[in-house]
Amino acid sequence: MEKVVLLSDPNSKAWDFAKKIQNHFVENRKFFVPIQEISIKHFRNHELNLHVQENVRQKEVYFIHDSTKDPQQWWVELLLLKDLLLSASATSISYVLPDMLYSRQDRKDKPHVAISARTVARSISPNLKRIITMDLHAPQIQGFYPEEVPVDNLYSFPIVVKYLKENKIIPTELKELVVLSPDAGGVDRARAFAQKLGSNYPIAFIEKRRVTAGEVKEMRLVGEVKDKDVLIVDDIIDSGGTQCKAHDLLKEKGAKNIYAYGTHGLFTEGTEKICSKFNLIMTSNTHYQTGNSATVIDVSPIFAEAIWRAQKGLSISELFE
Ligand code: R5P
């Protein structure tokens, strides 16, 4: 651990997240890990110019990235930073990507499309030590990375369930809860969430068809929600269209209270419309939300523990048992 440094852009939203990770080490591991600054500037034609002032020679660097940046810049920063750190003789480079962007296109769902999750993996993985991310859109994206670059896909559901229980958000006497995935690909996520809630809650899912990326066309419910409360669990809330359409369908099918959780809260259409529909909307702070109308749950302790355990050779899966 002595050689570990955290690296982040002080002008980005990731800086506070890096500070939270640092505080976690101090408070829970009685260990101080320095945070070094990376300066990111633009040439007049918008080319990026990266610079790290302090020495990183023989350091084990964990770069905490900002998932709210423009996705194209997010990607190029990862490429340039690796070159910078290798040239500066860092011993190892690990990327902490709270939200792995470009993950939604992870297969050829129609002809003539790019598998962008694979392209990201191929471009960023050479010479990396590891990647730490959370609630990947599809866990099999890990398979796009070569075996020498392990991808730790952390789960947010244990900390979210703890939050729900501690704050009595989902009343413990609630017997009639259904945990629902708004698409078929998220059924395992909903099941894991339901199991962690611990009351043998049934799961359901929605079969969803999109017209274009970003616009949902049709939804069909698979499961029973009449007179039940429903907790929708998804990986991303982008425009909120999926959640809102799911809400309307569930109401039509007789659901009572409807709660929603999406790990990565992009809220590209704002939070007002979506939040007014639901009994409660929750997200994590992988997009550094600070909590306006959505409830934001801090997942930085899981990232801190994952870094600690990766360095100490301890199990990361134990975090989720
Ligand atoms: C899609 O497959 C994802 O799991 C999310 O359901 C989706 O990205 C949410 O997008 P939006 O909020 O724009 O409907």
Image (spheres, rainbow, N blue to C red):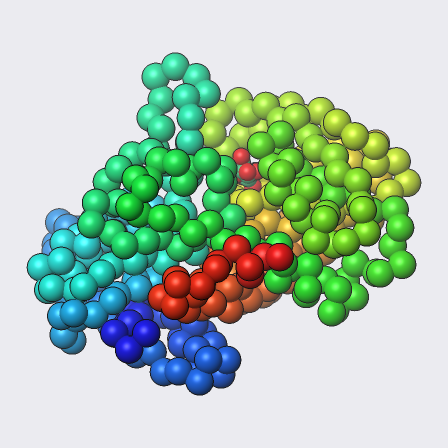
**Pick the front one: 93 or 239:** 93
Q: Position of residue 285 (x, y in %)?
A: 51, 61
Residue 235 is left or right of residue 66, and the answer is: right
Point 59% across, 49% down: residue:
262
- Please determine whether, in this image, residue 210 is positioned above or below residue 270: above
**Pick the front one: 199 or 258:** 199
Q: Position of residue 260 (x, y in %)?
A: 68, 49
Point 68% across, 30% down: residue:
206
Point 47% across, 29% down: residue:
213
Q: Position of residue 73 (x, y in %)?
A: 27, 49
Point 18% across, 64% down: residue:
91
- Please determine whether, in this image, residue 45 is positioned above or below residue 310: above
Q: Quadrant of residue 11?
A: bottom left
Residue 291 is left or right of residue 109, and the answer is: right
**Pick the front one: 93 or 222:** 93
- Quadrant in which the C terminus is drawn: bottom right
Q: Position of residue 71 (x, y in %)?
A: 34, 46
Residue 316 is left or right of residue 4, and the answer is: right
**Pick the front one: 275 or 111:** 111
Number of on-image labels: 0
